[in-house]
Image (cartoon, rainbow, N blue to C red):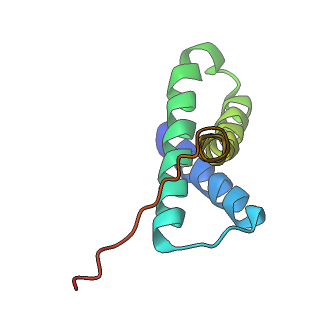
Amino acid sequence: MLAALAFFGASFAGLATQLRSGNTLTRRTVAATMLNSGFIGAIIALLGYQTFAEDLPYLMGMSLLAGIGGATILDFALLLLKRRMGITIRIEQDKGE
């Protein structure tokens, strides 16, 4: 139950970060951001449960911050690859021509 709540909260925290960035939003970017941030938040909640089981608000706060950080780290890594190495990653749908 805790992991599901952490996934839900972190995924929307990551989506909020994506919305604030001003980048164009597609279904893929929204899905990728929410899944990435949600899984990171759930993993943090599961890893920290043994240590912080008595302080669940703290644990959920850590998961939300991890969701925000997950979206930011992914954007930073892609930007770093583009600027330093000249690598551009594009995901395009085949138009079926």
Q: Which residue is at a point 22% across and 82% down the rendered structure image?
A: 96
Q: Is residue 42 visible?
A: yes
The outermost residue toward the left is: 96
Q: Which residue is at a point 67% across and 53% down the rendered structure image?
A: 13
Above or below residue 64? Residue 51 is above
Relative to the observer, which residue lies in front, 87 or 18? 87
Displayed quadrant of residue 18: bottom right
Compared across the picture, whether 95 is left or right of 35 comes to: left
Question: Where, quadrant-wise, is the C terminus in this rendering?
Answer: bottom left
Displayed quadrant of residue 22: bottom right
Q: Is residue 1 visible?
A: no
Position in image of residue 11 (x %, y %): 57, 53
The outermost residue toward the top is: 51
Position in image of residue 15 (x %, y %): 63, 60
Relative to the observer, which residue lies in front, 11 or 5? 11
Q: Which residue is at a point 55% across and 55% down the rendered structure image?
A: 33
Q: Which residue is at a point 77% across and 64% down the rendered structure image?
A: 20
Position in image of residue 48 (x %, y %): 59, 21
Compared across the picture, whether 5 is left or right of 54 comes to: left
Position in image of residue 86 (x %, y %): 58, 46
